Image (cartoon, rainbow, N blue to C red):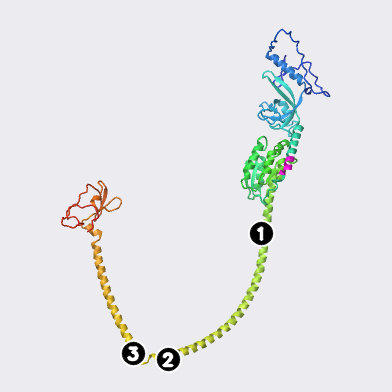
Amino acid sequence: MPARRRDDDQPFLWDRPASREPADTRGRTPASERPPERVPAPPAPPAAGPAEPPTLTVPQVAERLQVLLAESFPEPFWLTGEASGVKRGRHASGHWYFSLVDDQCTDDRKRACLGVVMWSRTVARLFGPRGRLSGRLQPEDGLVLRVLVRPEFYPPRGSISFIIEDVDPDYTLGNLDLQRRRVLERLTAEGALQWNKDVPLTPVPLRLGLITALESAAYNDVMQGLRACGLGFHVLCCDARMQGEQTSRSVRAALATLAGCGLDCILLVRGGGSRLDLSWFDREDIARAIAACPVPVLTGIGHEIDLSVADAVAHRAFKTPTAVSEFLVQAALDAQWQSEQAWEAIATGAREQLAEQQRALLLAARGVRQAAEGRVARETGELVASCQQLRAATERALGAAREDLAAVRARLAAGPHVERLAVQRVRLEADGERLRRAATARLAGAEAALAASADRARLLDPQRVLGRGFAWLRRADGRSLKDAAAAVEGEPLTAVLRDGELDLRALAARPAPRDPAAPPGTPALPGSPALPGPAVP
């Protein structure tokens, strides 16, 4: 059967048989829902034994497959499934190749999968700058799509592809809204919408965590707003994907990281986008991570109309990233103004109280001075009277003492007392003379003993002994070598002489000759070899 090529040089279409249904099927049961028409089987050969399987060529099989495909799907039909591999399947020519998988099955090994193709002109018609779905819908991995497709068999590869001719955005967006409502219902039933709102937010949050795509418009909006106010904000940024399959994982990781950094609050912001772009923040795992975060989370998803699930569970939600920074700046400015007003009120109250206390102090000082002057006058009069009384009493006591002293002198001047005093004076002078002579004798004896000790010390001075020709042998460890038998052959020694030291080495030890008649311990005879040891007399 001849093949007809597409105008874009893509896999060709096989002509459908003339017996296919007409294009207009309105009011009739769709062909996809009717049982396929079966071609009558050829008459069976006479039973003359086991039938031999027929032999077909590859073109014949391909033709039969094309006929079956055309009979089963005579018209385009709507197909629903979860998109997979969208970005990886975008060809340089502008065509999109990806798959639709079963969105109801959770086992990846058993999920049914169909390959779909969207030609470049269909992409431009639907998603181009002036496309019908531009700004409303953009196919992404994980989205459930409803697409109008027609099957096409490509014999050179032996594969069946489903060509996308149209996309139903209301189905995808409606499905996203349904999922969003279900997530909100589950979170509401658990009370999770209130968890992060119950976390107290400090009145002046200055230590901030920022979760967004670094160097994005949302990042610049927040940072410029915080820098422009001139206040001391400390911002710890954490880069995260704000769109696509990596959004959930990166946002949850950023929340877990910043939750343990001792921050006042965490900002989750992103720039504007379509309703589909916002759907990534309707994910239940992101919502639960925000709800369970021990730090208040402020969201600025950047959507003026819709409220995402992340906004619903956050401590507080704002429309844009700029609104988040304005809220924080205004809170800091309000706190600064309130503190300035409080300080001004404190200063005014302190000045007034100080002035009042100064006036009270002056009055108290004036009263104290008057009371002190009166008290001093009274005490002065009493002191003068006491002085006069003391003087009179002292004069009376001195007069009485003079009379008593005169009486004592008179009694002492009598004869017996004078004689006794003379005897005691003579006795005292004799004792003093004896003490002087004894002290002089004792001092002379001590001086003689000291002189004798000095002479012995000069005789026993080691330097004088060395000066007479003796030597002092010292070992390497500083100990003296006293006996020749204690020396070790080859041992290094030091000989200390009168004017210096000599390094020696011990040879074989020889006892010095001694006088047979000399008692034990007598030094060697003069002229005999010197033995090791200290040379002392």
The residue sitting at 20% across, 51% down in the picture is 511
Q: Which mark is residue 407?
A: 2
Give the prevailing secondary structure in the magenta stretch: helix
State yes or no: residue 190 in magenta.
Answer: yes
Mark 2, mark 1: which one is toward the viewer?
2
Type of the residue with mark 3: Glu
In x, y percent, where is residue 95?
Answer: 69, 26
Q: Are marks 1 and 3 in contact (CB under 8 Å)?
A: no
The residue sitting at 31% across, 85% down in the picture is 426
Q: Is residue 200 above or below residue 217?
A: below
Question: Dot 2, crowdedness within 10 Å: few (<14), some or many (≥20)?
Answer: few
In the image, 494 versus 52, the foreground residue is 52
Type of the residue with mark 1: Trp
Q: Are marks 2 and 3 in contact (CB under 8 Å)?
A: no
Q: Quadrant of the N terminus?
A: top right
Label 1 vs 3, first from the N-terminus? 1
User: Which range is magenta?
Assistant: 184-192
Q: Secondary structure at mark 2?
A: helix
Task: Give the Cα distance between marks 2 and 1.
Answer: 87 Å
Question: Dot 3, crowdedness within 10 Å: few (<14), some or many (≥20)?
Answer: few
Residue at which label 3 appears: 419
Label 2 vs 3, first from the N-terminus? 2
Mark 2, mark 3: which one is toward the viewer?
3
The residue sitting at 75% across, 36% down in the picture is 178
